[in-house]
Amino acid sequence: MNANAHAAIGVFDSGLGGLSVLRAIREVLPAEDLLYLADSGYAPYGDRDEAFIVARSMAMCDFLVRQGAKAIVVACNTATVVAARQLRERFNVPIVAMEPAIKPAVELTRSKVVGVLATSRTVASPAVATLVERHGQGVDIRLQACPGLVTQVEKGDLDGPHTRELLAQYLAPLREAGADTLVLGCTHYPFLLPVIQEMVGPSVTIVESAAAVAREVVRRTAHLRHPLHGQRDGETRFFTTADVADARLRMSALWDSVADVQPVPMAT
Ligand code: DGL
């Protein structure tokens, strides 16, 4: 057995969005202990410069490694496209990262128009340009930056008037272009899925990456599987760089069993 097999898998995001990925990981790995770290004190990342995102992502991984994490999941598209390479160079544990589900969307579209909703930083990244070039032949892929949406999810406003207003603004050009498939390229957006689906109607297919990332976590941690796999329920522990009482309240709205949230000093 690998010496690290009892250790937890660490998952981080700029805030609460990564809980959508945590949910998918928990489904396929019920026996593993999971650590979830929300950098809500510094969210959103998506409108910040690269140096900031790299520094925060390094601090998040450093904290998780110090907690003993045997693998790390970057449950944030923005941190992935900006910092995944540096994280893999720096840290000596398997690092699983996200990418917007452009490839599956291209396979699904019939209208040959795909809309991608993501943060400004993700939309502008060379990593996304590469994905479009690699998988987008013959398909019109419209990248739509969505400033403000992450903040709405962080506030717990999943379907209020301002959230709907922002969504209407971002969805309009994609609908006008004839997109029949939408990619949620930010881990916060799956929490908006019901309202997005309501706004675009049932004929539009919405895809996201959480299940694919969870499968990748299973594959990359196979040699580190908990020895009691199949015989125990893993624990999930939550950490935040924001106010803990506030985080507990907001996380509980998105995850049904947040018993406790531990503080992480802002300056990690
Ligand atoms: N959940 C992050 C993502 O997937 C949001 C980044 C942000 O904080 O802007 O991109």
Image (cartoon, helix red, strand yellow):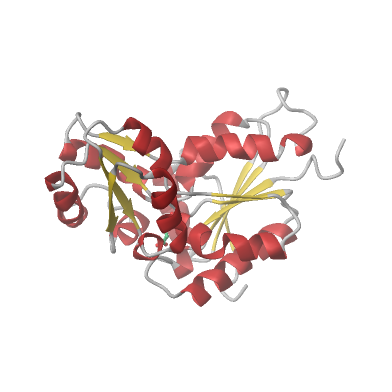
Which residue is outermost to the left? 176
Residue closest to the eye, 81 or 217:
81
**Residue 266 position within the rendered picture, expressed as x and y whole percent measured from the top left:** 56, 73
Total labels: the figure holds: 0
Residue closest to the eye, 114 or 60:
114
Residue, x 64% and y 35% (percent of image)?
A: 218
Q: Is residue 112 visible?
A: yes
Residue 83 occupies quadrant: bottom right
Q: Is residue 259 above or below residue 129?
A: above
Residue closest to the eye, 239 or 208:
208
**Residue 238 position within the rendered picture, expressed as x and y whole percent measured from the top left:** 57, 51
Q: Quadrant of ligand 1?
A: bottom left
Residue, x 67% and y 59% (percent of image)?
A: 88
Q: Is residue 55 above or below residue 116?
A: below
In the picture, which quadrant includes the C terminus?
bottom right
Q: Is residue 186 visible?
A: no
**Residue 185 position within the rendered picture, expressed as x and y whole percent measured from the top left:** 38, 50
Classify residue 10 as left or right of residue 241. right
Residue closest to the eye, 147 or 20:
147
Which residue is outermost to the top? 230
Classify residue 28 as left or right of residue 200. right
Residue, x 62% and y 68% (percent of image)?
A: 59
Residue 122 occupies quadrant: bottom left
Residue, x 48% and y 73% (percent of image)?
A: 50
